[in-house]
Image: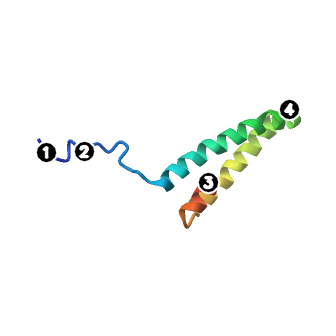
Amino acid sequence: MKEDTKISNYCKFDSQLLTSFTSSLYIAGLISSFLASPVTGAFGRKPSILIGGAAFLAGSALGGAAVNVYMLILG
């Protein structure tokens, strides 16, 4: 049996920056869930979906243009 078959790639990365990036995704979802109901109540479903899509597009563009990890986390 080969030696590298015994090594699991699961939980191999112990990086604080990777953990911060993953946590930022959940924090953004938590914050947006509190804002979704008032926006939908005030403007309706279609505008709220368009606002969410525009925010996702802006965040994706910022993440794609990130030059360092901190810009990726904030995007």
- What is the CA distance from the residue labelled 1 to the residue labelled 3? 41 Å
Q: Secondary structure at mark 2?
A: loop
**Amino acid, disc 3:** Ser
Q: In the image, what residue occupies the spot 13% across and 45% down?
A: 2
Q: Earlier in the sequence, mark 1 or mark 3?
A: 1
Instruction: Decide which of tag 1 and tag 4 comes sooner along the chain.
Output: 1
Q: Secondary structure at mark 1?
A: loop
Residue 49 position by quadrant: top right
Q: Secondary structure at mark 4?
A: helix
Give the labeled residue for mark 1.
2
Looking at the picture, which amino acid does disc 4 mark?
Answer: Gly
Seen as rendered, the residue at the extreme left is 1
Q: Which mark is residue 60?
A: 3
Extreme-right residue of the structure: 42
- Sequence order check: which comes first, mark 1 or mark 2? 1
Q: Where is mark 4, residue-wise?
A: 41
Q: Give coordinates of residue 55: x percent, y percent.
A: 71, 49
Viewer can see residue 59: yes
Residue 46, position as x, y percentages in the image: 79, 36
Depicted 2 relative to depicted 74: above or below: above
Nearer-N-terminus badge (3/4): 4
Circle 2 sits on which residue? 7
Dot 1 amino acid type: Lys
Which mark sits nearer the N-terminus, 2 or 4?
A: 2
Q: Does 74 sit left or right of 8 as displayed?
A: right
| Number of the front mark, 2 or 4 | 2
- Quarter of the image with the N terminus is top left
The reply to whether callout 3 and callout 4 are in contact (CB within 8 Å) is: no
Q: Residues within 10 Å of mark 4 (few under 14, many from 20)?
A: few
Q: Nearer the viewer, residue 61 or 20?
A: 20
Q: CA distance from mark 2 to mark 4?
A: 51 Å
**Relative horizontal placement of residue 72, taking residue 43 as reference (left or right):** left
